[in-house]
Amino acid sequence: MDKKSILQALEKLKKESKKRNFSQSVDLIITLKDLDLKNPDHQIDFFVNLHHSMNKKMKVCALVGPELADECKKVCDETILSTQFIEYKEPRKAKSLAKKYDFFIAQASLMAQVASTFGRALGPRGKMPNPKVGAIVVAKPQIKPLYEKLQQTVHLIAKKETSIHVLVGKEDQEPEQLVDNIIYTYEQLIHHLPKEKNNINSINLKLTMSKPVNI
């Protein structure tokens, strides 16, 4: 995969897609092969901090105690205090919350409570507060930099299916930014595959309302 082939795929998407009254997301879809996903060593689960904004606000919810509440309320899109956790024991409410946010951050000392209360809703969606992206926090100064970092972060995950689907930007973004995000994501994925490029079956780009286009 090179810059030229990506630009050609983006141009094809633009030509073949109907004009919508909103800016469509550009998604990168990578299908893998020759992996045994029952083997933990073959499973994919990591985060990529992109070079450029995706031109989409990533919504962040904080699950914290009173120690971090003030700072989280200033920075995050929603803050749920530990005293409110009991309200989310109701499965429907927890699932509704899980769908609403892209990322969840949590206070380190509350992780056991977070897991028992929100685990069933967040776990299957790959949204549990994750130390790999710094989403388990202990102090106020961590909150704002983490929130800003998450605005350019994507989660690559393949544990049950050999297909990875991630947002890399919006159709009205500069093509050079999209290309850079796509190549960087691809390069990071390669380093996590046992056979590197040989585990790649296909690479496609897709707009929100379009058919996929192969790179």
Image: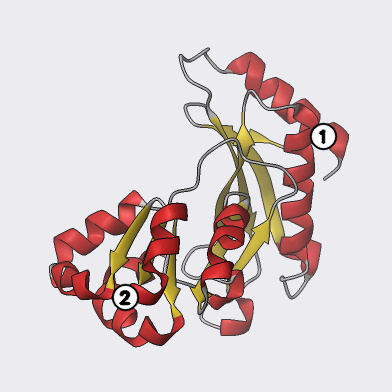
**Sequence-earlier tag: 1 or 2:** 1
**Residue beneath the point at 62% across and 26% down:** 171
Do we see residue 26 in this rendering?
yes
Do we see residue 65 in this rendering?
no
**Residue beneath the point at 23% across and 54% down:** 96
Label 2 neighbour load within 10 Å: few <14, some 14-19, many 20+: some
The reply, left or right, for residue 1 in relation to residue 58 is right
The local secondary structure at tag 2 comes to helix
Of tags 1 and 2, which is closer to the observer?
A: 2
Q: How many marks?
A: 2
Horizontal and vertical percent for residue 176?
80, 32
Horizontal and vertical percent for residue 156?
59, 61
Which residue in the structure is indicated by mark 2?
119
The local secondary structure at tag 1 comes to helix
The reply, left or right, for residue 162 in relation to residue 4 is left
Horizontal and vertical percent for residue 23?
53, 23
